[in-house]
Amino acid sequence: MPVFQAGYHTESLGTEIVEAIPPLAGHIPRLTHLRYTPAGSVHKIYVMKCIGTTLADKEAASNQANIDFVDTSPHITPAGAQETIAANDWVCYMTEAGIEGNDVASIAGNVVTFNQNLGAVVPKGGGIYVFGELTRAVHTALWPTVSATNDYADLTIQAGIPADTDVYQARSGSGDPMLIVVDNPTAAGALEYLSGVYVADSDLTQN
């Protein structure tokens, strides 16, 4: 069974800790282990699921903050209406060096501007995965204990949205990435590690 993992990651206080889990064709990523140590303030860990996909309309150079999207409304609201990407939404995109996660600063036409510059070139036709806002109901939030090392050793959080969670936007999660974002306010924390597996797309067990 294919696996994924990420090692130690911290950021200055007030800067989100972001880890993007790349997609794997024919498989669904499932987060199984995570260890996090918040310092002296409450932190929240968001395990985010993809809610829509599109493509880069043209090549976007590294060290710039803009990507032209083919479609800026590739997802729908929980009420079933078409929804346009907005500021503070989270997005993953495929670069020539791998997958990156970033949050949206603004949108004008089909040009999406992010809060952080791109770390590598996004090729024309590169995959773009929309996750929406952190607090969207389809995502899972974890509340680690302050000033302690929190071991989550028996997680079964996987990509995909079951119909009983969002009937209008049910998706299997096959070929989707996942995105882990820690808000990291006030006192800097540390993501010690995370790991998981890619399950066959016939396995739709979700939580």
Image (tube, helix red, strand yellow):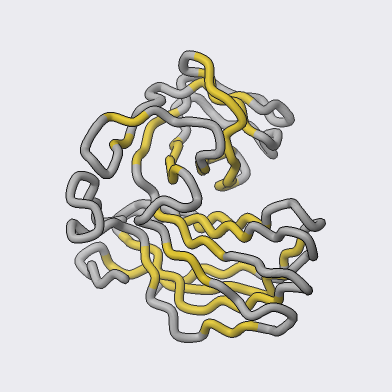
Horizontal and vertical percent position of residue 36: 65, 75
Residue 100 drawn at (x, y percent):
59, 45
In the rendered view, would you say 158 is above or below 173? below
- 91 lies left or right of 71: right
For the point 39% across and 70% down, the residue is 157
Q: Which quadrant would the N terminus be assigned to in this image? A: bottom left
Outermost residue, top direction? Answer: 109
Horizontal side, residue 118 vs residue 197: left or right: right
Q: Give the side of residue 25 with respect to residue 44, left or right.
A: left
Q: Residue at x 61, y 24 (%)?
A: 66
Q: Which residue is drawn at 44% across and 31% down?
A: 85
Residue nearest the observer in this picture, 202 or 35: 35
Q: Which residue is drawn at the image coordinates 40% and 54% (left, top)?
A: 49
Instruction: Check the picture and name the quadrant holding the C terminus.
Output: bottom left
Q: Looking at the image, which is closer to me, 13 or 9?
A: 13
Q: Quadrant of residue 191?
A: bottom right
Q: Who is closer to the viewer here, 40 or 67?
A: 40
The count of marks equals 0
What is the x, y in percent for residue 169? 24, 46
Could you say which is closer to the camera, residue 107 or residue 20? 107
Reply above or below: 69 against 16. Answer: above
Image x and y of residue 50, in percent: 39, 49
Q: Judge left or right: residue 128 versus residue 186.
A: left
